[in-house]
Image (tube, helix red, strand yellow):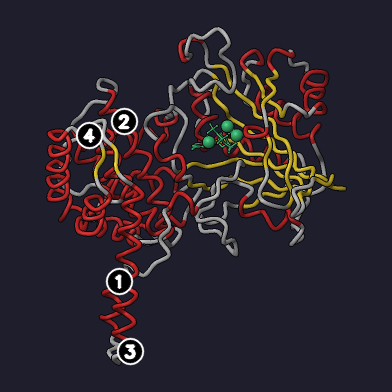
Amino acid sequence: KKIGLHEIRQEFIDFFKDKGHLVIKSFPLIPKNDKSLLLINAGMAPLKPYFTGEKTPPSKRIVTCQKCIRTADIENVGKTDRHATFFEMLGNFSFGDYFKREAIEWAWEFLTERLEIPKEDLWVSIYKEDDEAFKIWNEVIGLEKEKIVPLGKEDNFWELEIGPCGPCSEIYIDRGKKYGCGKKDCKPGCDCERFIEIWNLVFTQYDKDKNGEYHPLEHPNIDTGMGLERITAIIEGARNIFEIEEIQHILKFVEKTSGKKYGIDPSVDTSIRVITDHSRAITFMVSDGILPSNEGRGYVLRRLIRRAARHGKLLGIEEPFLNKIVDVVISSWKVEYPELEEKKVQIKKVIQAEEEKFQETIHQGINILENYIEELISKGDKCLSGKNAFKLYDTYGFPLDLTREILEEKGLTVDEKGFNQQMEKQRNMARKARKSVVDSGWKNAQSTELFSDYDTQFVGYDILEIETKV
Ligand code: ATP
Ligand code: MG
Ligand code: MG
Ligand code: MG
């Protein structure tokens, strides 16, 4: 069947609509009333109050296609076939209505009958103590027991500190030996790219109390998530999510702008894929009202823009280009997200301003970092001091992970603890300075602006984000 990303999204929505699900549009990327999460990272995230029982859902069956950002995957982008920072997650949800059997049967029906994926290519993992799931896969669906891989709690049990939780079952596609590591026991869970996880079915059947005890829920829930780009890659036979047709428009634009060919030099390919991915992320983030800043979501955005700009430099692109790439992104996704077109002018302005700001200092910053690197190498050192890393951040606008990434390319590291200490020191100084300014009665707007960059709750973007499984 020749169908692309937009058609697969629609097939999924229609399939579950026919099964009595209420269709809800994607929620924005900024979580509402949820301090535990910086950015929406799964279809279930904005629906959490329905799972906890805090709110009554508009329907017991809901289907969505949710915009997601996972900064935790940033280091994987461009390196693995399957990780993006921005992606769309398809999901069907049951709030105390249908449970395990229907969730599994419908997932199987959708994949094998609607999308006509050969049954032989499908494998699953289950939580090792979930006999019920094993039985359904084995006896109801007829999947061979060798293709049902039991995994432990870290992989196949979904839970937060407290509240609804339960085992999950993940569906994988075997892409064949050519993607494999060649090991004899290669199967789902192996860290090579032969078996791609496409869909996670979570069976929230317990309520975890504050003592860590699990109580069976009277009305268990279903929460599923399937990566739209991943399933599209499978259907199109693309090698990775960046090479699916819809995303290739962006990839080709990067090729054209840089004059570099994709598919020859692996490091060039990584840069092209990073830019391709980040351009989608930044377009959607700005359209949802996020602005570049030095804290929280704004810092994630800043980091993505600067990282994309730096990979542009690696490809030899001299002029700011990210605001042009936004047009390509918008022309592909405005069908599903018309707000992109409406806010186009503003999105481009924000991204251009941030890229230009970075342009002003990137050359200087890179020169300085190269000097540091030479110095390290000549001394036989391996680790850049926190002080120097902080100087790059503070004076040249280099996010820490950019510095780390450049160092890693040379086999070096950075003292992150030292960096954070410098950050803390700077923040205390700013706080003190501000206080004395306020104490002395000098309270104009400029004085607060001067220090606002430092007086933030910066604790590192990664630990701000709690990874939820689906
Ligand atoms: P993986 O093990 O491959 O990192 P995951 O177990 O972290 O995936 P889940 O949290 O179970 O993923 O999310 C549900 C689905 O969302 C996955 O099965 C996958 O199809 C998709 N997905 C997850 N992370 C990404 C990503 N970074 N980019 C694209 N799709 C993703
Ligand atoms: Mg993951
Ligand atoms: Mg997984
Ligand atoms: Mg998973």
Instruction: Check disc 4: other Cα within 10 Å, few if <14, some if 14-19, many if 20+.
Output: few
Tell me whether circle 4 and circle 1 mark residues in contact (CB < 8 Å): no
Q: Which residue is mark 4?
A: 256
Q: Which residue is mark 3?
A: 439
Tell me whether circle 3 and circle 2 mark residues in contact (CB < 8 Å): no
- Image quarter where ligand 3 lies: top right
Question: Quadrant of residue 432 in the image?
Answer: bottom left
Q: CA distance from mark 4 to mark 1?
A: 47 Å
Q: Name the N-terminal-most of marks 4 and 1.
A: 4
Question: Quadrant of residue 317 in the image?
Answer: top left
Is residue 159 visible in this depiction of the protein? yes
Query: What amino acid type is highlighted by mark number 1?
Result: Met
> For the point 67% across and 39% down, which residue is it?
224
| Above or below, 233 relative to 373 | above
The C terminus is located in which quarter?
Answer: top right
Residue 57 position within the rendered picture, expressed as x and y whole percent measured from the top left: 74, 57
The mark found on residue 429 in the picture is 1
Q: Name the N-terminal-most of marks 3 and 2.
A: 2
Residue 212 position within the rendered picture, expressed as x and y whole percent measured from the top left: 74, 48
Query: Toward the viewer: 297 or 320?
Result: 297
